[in-house]
Image: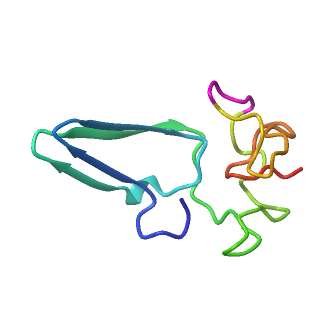
Amino acid sequence: MRRVGHPLELRATNGAANIDVDHSDLNLGATKTMIVGSGAGAVANLGGNVNVDPLFVSSADRHLQPGSPTINAGRATVQQNESTTDRDGLPRLVGAASDMGAYEVQ
């Protein structure tokens, strides 16, 4: 969600587009909204969100550097339907809470 034109886009056309956001690193204040016709929608901030530089290793490597403010900033438990492993196939929950992003610092 980082370093894109708009961090979140809500688009609804003849239906509802409702998005619940929690424990994420994004700028909810810059949400782009497009509601067309009989569409409806809203973004709900459920808490635990931050808007910080996650300190990726590089633009091509989305692993977190030591000292990233997104380490242990996710939820304290693996959620229903959430994978128990990260993109590297390693445990998703290491420490007090999961890390924000696709890769868990091991």
Camera-side residue of 93 and 87: 87
Q: Whole-percent x and y of residue 35?
A: 19, 48
Q: Residue drawn 48% across and 69% down? A: 4
Relative placement, left or right, of 24 versus 30 is right
Of all residues, the one furthest to the left in this rendering is: 37
Q: Residue drawn 86% across and 40% down? A: 94
Vertical relation: 35 (above or below) 83? below
Camera-side residue of 47 and 98: 98
Q: Main secondary structure of the magenta part?
A: loop
Of all residues, the one furthest to the top in this rendering is: 80
Relative placement, left or right, of 15 versus 69 is left
Display coloring: rainbow
Q: Whole-percent x and y of residue 36?
A: 15, 49
Q: Residue drawn 61% across and 42% down? A: 23
Vertical relation: 52 (above or below) 77? below
Q: Whole-percent x and y of residue 44?
A: 41, 37
Vertical relation: 87 (above or below) 55? above
Based on the displayed image, in which of its 4 quarters is residue 15 positioned? top left
Number of numbered discs visible in the structure rendering: 0
Residue 74 lies in the magenta stretch: no
Camera-side residue of 98 and 53: 98
Of all residues, the one furthest to the front in this rendering is: 89
Based on the displayed image, in which of its 4 quarters is residue 40 positioned? top left
Q: Residue drawn 81% across and 65% down? A: 65
Camera-side residue of 16 and 95: 16
Give the residues in magenta. 76-81
Q: Whole-percent x and y of residue 89?
A: 81, 46
Relative placement, left or right, of 50 versus 66 is left
